[in-house]
Amino acid sequence: MSQLRATKPGLLVCAAICVSVFLYVRVPNREESEEEPTHPAVVGCGFYPDELCSALFEGKEAALQIAKFCKTPHGLEILARFRTAGNCSRISQALHFMSRPLSAEEGNFSLAYIITVPKELATFVQLLRAIYVPQNVYCIHVDEKAPKKYQTAVQTLVSCFENVFISSKRQKVANTGFTRLQADINCMKDLVRSKFQWNYVINLCGQDFPIKTNKEIIHYIRSKWNDKNITPGVIQPPNTKSQMSQSRPESTPEGSIYVSPNKIFKDKPPHNLTIYFGSAHYVLTRKFVQFVLTDIRAKDMLQWSKDIHSPERHYWVTLNRLKDAPGATPNAGWEGDIRAIKWRNEEGKVHDGCKGRYVGDSCVYGPGDLPWIIRSSSLFASKFDSSTDPTAVTCLERRHRRQALRQAEVPADPHWRFQQRSHLNAKLNR
């Protein structure tokens, strides 16, 4: 009783805040307040109920305020299920993985994914289960410098699925640079050699998350890019030519690597190739991947790219502009809605500003960016950082699963659905 009396004032404050905020969320016509509410420090507010997520998608200010102080430690529920589930059947069910194609159309159209795994296991689980269906195939690149415990956990999960495997060749990977490009090439070799017959390959990293369902991705490819590659980009602009200088890999004391440009400019490209500048993200046909792995121009271009800055932003788009490349789009520009990204220099023109925070030239999304993200026609959105603010991905994941099940042409197994939450569990930080 004495403990209850001691915590009663704090509990009343928290309860009052939660009730008032949710009343605001429920009543859309109420006049918005410009002042931020005062509130006690909060450790967790449950697993982000659908009611809160729905309000965030609508851009309700009250929902944004409650999301600011409701910070559930990322991945606790996911990790708990992963560690206690036991055998593979229980793991896949506990983590809500799909176990059958959701339609005949999807079952007959296989996608391959190349995933450079994030630093956190829970983030990887969320990304993989969002895009996982048994008819697709997934090559996972685990950074060579990742802790052994993490590598073991990823291997444990991957081994539960026949169509998911770890790349046969690992290396240290920087966010940009040749190591990132080589990691994709390594996975492409594994995918071509695998027993799975896939139609297109898509590359993802740990900061990506899907906006569209598997069915919607297939419809987009078939309707606008049938048998064509998607590599947004243009002939290298003059302001990027200085970035084509040679670069050198460097290391930090912690073992992370990054790429630092030199002042020495690169020699002319092999075979007199016209260099294009574009996105590091792509959707490529299987025939084009085989071309990349065997054509002499592609091989020489890869060697030439070893010491240039951000080669992943030149390599794919340059090769896809060759007229004789399978699925080539020689006259394409920035077409291709692959990623929804808020670039700093496009604020006020393409988007309404970053509601999370800018890191470098691009936005790391926060809950306030959700309305813009779900309005996007892109297949995926980037960037997210669930370790600092899991709300955005958590809400997107729940929305994505509901859409997939709504579009399904087969009965849903019970474990495909996420647990429904309609309440807020507030805990005081003491």
Image: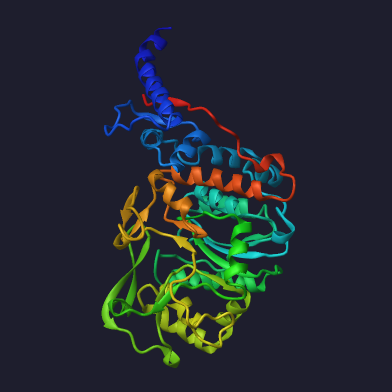
Vertical comparison of 131 with 230: above or below: above
Pinpoint residue 386: horizontal percent, then vertical percent.
Answer: 44, 46
Q: Nearer the viewer, residue 412 or 60?
A: 60
Residue located 43% across and 29% down the image: 27
Callout count: 0
Q: Quadrant of residue 291?
A: bottom right
Q: Residue furthest left?
A: 263
Q: Quadrant where the C terminus lies?
A: top left
Pinpoint residue 116: horizontal percent, then vertical percent.
Answer: 50, 61
Residue located 69% across and 50% down the image: 408
Q: Residue furthest bottom?
A: 271
Pinpoint residue 369: horizontal percent, then vertical percent.
Answer: 40, 48
- Residue 67 seen in render: yes
Instruction: Say left or right for 392 vs 186.
Output: left
Instruction: Say left or right for 85 vs 243.
Output: right
Vertical comparison of 428 with 334: above or below: above
Residue located 69% across and 47% down the image: 88
Pinpoint residue 174: horizontal percent, then vertical percent.
Answer: 40, 65
- Residue 166 seen in render: no
Q: Nearer the viewer, residue 183 or 410?
A: 410
Q: Quadrant of residue 162?
A: bottom right
Residue located 41% across and 44% down the image: 367
